[in-house]
Image (tube, helix red, strand yellow):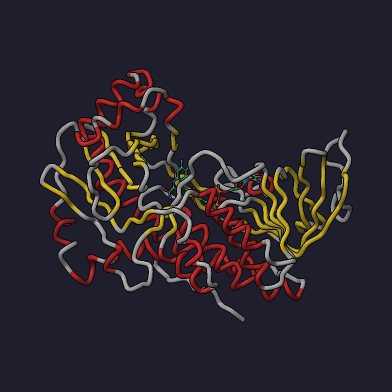
Amino acid sequence: MAGIPNLVPSTHETILDSQSTACCIVGAGPCGAMLALLLARRGISVTLLEMHKDFDREFRGDTIHPAILEVLDQIGLAASLHEIPHSKASGPTLQFADGAFQPFDLGRLKTRFPYILMVPQSRFLEFITKEAEKYPSFRLVMRANVKKLVEEDEVVRGVHYLGPDGWHELRATLTVGADGRFSQLRQLAGIEPIKTAPPMDVLWFRLPRLPNDMEVPGGVLGGIGRGRMLIVLDRADYWQTGLVFPKGQYQHLRAQGIEALRRTISEIEPRLAKHTESLTDWQQLSLLSVEASRCPRWHKPGLLLIGDAAHVMSPVGGVGINYAIQDAVVATNILASPLKAGVVAESDLAEVQRKREWPTRVVQALQSFLQKNLIQRVLTSQKPVRVPWQLRALVHIPVVRDLPGRLIAFGPLRVHLLET
Ligand SMILES: Cc1cc2nc3c(=O)[nH]c(=O)nc-3n(C[C@H](O)[C@H](O)[C@H](O)COP(=O)(O)OP(=O)(O)OC[C@H]3O[C@@H](n4cnc5c(N)ncnc54)[C@H](O)[C@@H]3O)c2cc1C
């Protein structure tokens, strides 16, 4: 009921305690963890709630793009991030029927970091939250499963979360939903994303490195077979491999069995034939059901959605983490002063959406173009596919050849952290 704080999440449960903070961030993924660090650095009281007990979960992507490396450099953390065991990728080499094709090369970009740094996401999140812990205004609560918004007079005033010992209340000037593609906060706020279904799904798995293994210039290899694509990322001590196949065919693939899967991989990339012997069980593979979406509205009074909670990116270009963290940087630039002042107007939240929505839409449109004109062709053809001549021509024109790389590395607008 408006005006009366609801302290009872269900008829049976009672609240064990109630705490308050300036900014309550739900979800310690790349977006939430980074926002928490950036706000804590500014002396803003911030509490980060994460439902898992640690950061060690299933594979979610390990890519840190140049835009994020530049921001980490701005706050003096790029060098120490590079101390974590990592590999680097500057651009894929795709093997088509008419030869190799390199759609972009980050190595040509003007930046201190002309590559994607690949660090296990768990190590990255530990690194960011450890840095945040150096600031007294930061608090991290693990095993905090947020299930309810506290609303008064139609303004979100915080959340109720379930910990191992029971229910807790966290009241906040601003609540941020950085809780990923299945966002509970988005659902609780009644915000419906507009979804599109890209034409593919991806199975991710590891293949071992073997003595005298192949070399992969640029760190990424792409192979094309009958109705399938194979992506191979050089992860120094293993090959991170993705098999891209038409949407909805997962059950069909499973029914054909793991032996057939091994054969498909070896047909596309014969140099991996021996490696595929390590695949013996479907438990070794994780399915990424590809979707893309964006929320028409990222906010309501007292609540902001960012990262995957506001927009799920297609995996083309691997930009999900990049765009999620850029949201956190822009949110810090716009909201740090209002949070310090203790009043965040809805127009401040709308400004975050205004600044971040259009770059997201530009890149989603480009991803959709590539899906329709290249990936769909590959996935529906039973014959070897050649690179469209227009694409081959474009990469020879100096002015346009670096555009795709720049979009993947930075997005349409380079984001910087404003220090005030
Ligand atoms: C299999 C797979 C592979 C991917 N590969 C790549 C890749 O190579 N490169 C890339 O850029 N992107 C990749 N992505 C996408 C990428 O993971 C996301 O774009 C990115 O993680 C978004 O960051 P986020 O912080 O917004 O959300 P998330 O990383 O999803 O983080 C959300 C966090 O919120 C927590 N949470 C959820 N609900 C609650 C709740 N109720 N209470 C408390 N906490 C909650 C979750 O546990 C999680 O820690 C991949 C995704 C998948 C699924």
Residue 259: percent from left, percent from top:
30, 20
Which quadrant of the structure image shows residue 39?
A: bottom right
Which quadrant of the structure image shows residue 226?
A: top left
Nearer to us in this view, 118 or 67: 118
Residue 211: percent from left, percent from top:
26, 39
Please, which residue is most extreme toward the front here?
211
Residue 182: percent from left, percent from top:
58, 42
Residue 240 visible here? yes
Nearer to us in this view, 258 or 126: 126
The C terminus is located in which quarter? bottom right
Nearer to us in this view, 316 or 90: 90
Q: In this view, does 288 lie to the left or right of 301?
A: left
285 up-or-down from 418: above or below = above
Q: Which residue is drawn at 51% across and 52% down?
A: 311
Which quadrant of the structure image shows residue 89?
A: bottom left
Counting the numbered discs, the total is 0
Q: In this view, does 351 lie to the left or right of 340?
A: left
337 up-or-down from 25: above or below = below
Residue 110: percent from left, percent from top:
32, 73
Residue 297 visible here? no
Please, which residue is most extreme toward the bottom here?
420
Q: Which residue is drawn at 25% across and 28% down?
A: 264
